[in-house]
Structure formats: structure tokens, C-alpha cells
Amino acid sequence: MHRGRSIWILVPMLALTGCAGMSEQQCAVTDWRSVGFEDGVAGRAVSSVGNYRQACSKYGVAPDLDAYRSGHAEGAEVYCRPGRGFEVGRSGQRYQGVCPTESESEFLAAYAEGRHLHELESALYAVNSQISGKQNRIAQLKKDIASGSAAIVATETPAEERARLLVEIADMAKEQGEIEKEIVALESDRSLREQDLAAFQETLAYGY
């Protein structure tokens, strides 16, 4: 296999297997400039080279730090664009301080917008999840109440069992009523969060 081809195969292999799983051959022939570039594009800190150094030390191989740092700087230029900052923030990822001073302020401004959008969307998702969970509980309660009611009127049900079922049904009906009130409050909260999200989306400088 041509050496140039092996380099480009090894770079994605590092991402797939993790630096801890690097083989002696990978450590020996990896293009560290390309690895640095990929880490920079992914927003990983330049200190990530320490992980490769640790993985390869058992083979007596050390990464080419200058090549890695050079590639990382090139990759960071791609990563540190405002649009990318917005995407990183919206996805909830953590910024690892890879951007140079001259581009960091615009990146962070976009990142902050994306991060706030992420928080608003996450909050709305959480409320919707709570409502869904409570609706599922009500559906189960209704099913259990119907089943208990059918058992009460069944001729083969003993009197003591009927009495027990009446108490259970009353408790379930009470729980259903409480949950329905909780859903009303959550739906009101959801409406406010939807309004906040829509209002913020209108102010965004970047697409969503």
C-alpha cells in the first residue's frame, strides 16, 4: 500500500478507535499534521496530543509535536468561524478554548447565541417530556379504573373485593385529578417557553 494512502486511512481510524487503541504501526506512520488538523477542526484542545503521546510511548514512539501543532492551528481556523460557533453552542458542546485571539470574540458571541438557543430548546423539551409522561400515567389510570369498575359489577366478585376495588378506584380518580391539574400548569409553562424560544429565534444573527 502506498504510504500516502495509509496516512489518510489512519487518521479516521484514530477517531474511530480512540487514541488509546493505537497500534505500533499507527504510531510509527501517522501523519501528525493531519491528526492535529482533524483535532482542530473538531474543536479539541491542542493538549489532546498528550493522549497520543501516552498511547505511543509504550512503543517508544513520540508524536511530532511541531507537525501536530501546525495542523491543529490550521484546523482551528476552520473550526473558529462564527457559524460553527453557533452550531457548537446549539448542540450543547463545550468550547475548549482552541480559537486564536483574533477570531475568538466573534466565535464566542455566536457560540453564546447557540448555547442560549440550546438551553431554551432543552427547557421546552423537558416540559414536553413531563407532559407526555403525565398523560401516559393518566391513560394507565383510566385503564385501571375501567378494569376495576368492570370487576365491581361482575357477579363473581366477592363483596370484600368490591369494597377494596372501590377504595382503589377512588384513590386512582384522585390521582388522575391531581395530575390533570399539574398538566394544566405545565401547559401554561410550555406556552411561556414557546414564546421565549420564538422571541429569541427572531433575534438570532445566525440560522437555525
Image (cartoon, rainbow, N blue to C red):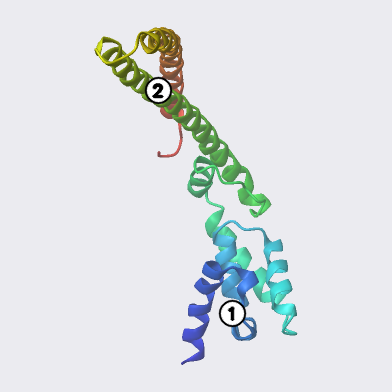
Crowding at dot 1, Cα within 10 Å, few <14 / some 14-19 / many 20+, comes out as many
The label nearer to you, 2 versus 1, is 2
Q: Residue at x 46, y 35 (%)?
A: 205
Query: What residue is disc 1 on?
Result: 31
Q: Residue at x 46, y 12 (%)?
A: 182
Question: Which element is circle 2 on?
Answer: helix
Q: Amino acid at mark 1?
A: Asp
Outermost residue, bottom direction? 1
Question: Which element is circle 1 on?
Answer: loop
Rendering coords of residue 171 (x, y %): 44, 10
Q: Amino acid at mark 2?
A: Arg
In-front residue for pair 147/31: 147
Answer yes or no: do the residues labelled 2 and 1 have beta carbons within 8 Å? Answer: no
Q: Name the mark on residue 46.
A: none
Relative vertical location of residue 160 with respect to residue 47 in this rendering, above or below = above
Relative vertical location of residue 140 with respect to residue 80 in this rendering, above or below = above
Asked whether, in this view, residue 16 is left or right of residue 128, the answer is right
Rendering coords of residue 142 (x, y %): 32, 17
Q: Residue at x 50, y 71 (%)?
A: 12
Q: How far apart are the alpha carbons under marks 2 and 1? A: 56 Å
The quarter in which the C terminus is drawn is top left
Query: What residue is disc 2 on?
Result: 137
In-front residue for pair 203/170: 170
Quadrant for residue 156, please give it. Answer: top left
Asked whether, in this view, residue 139 is left or right of residue 9, the answer is left
Rendering coords of residue 5 (x, y %): 46, 85
N-terminal of the pair, mark 2 or mark 1, is 1
Relative vertical location of residue 149 with respect to residue 115 in this rendering, above or below = above
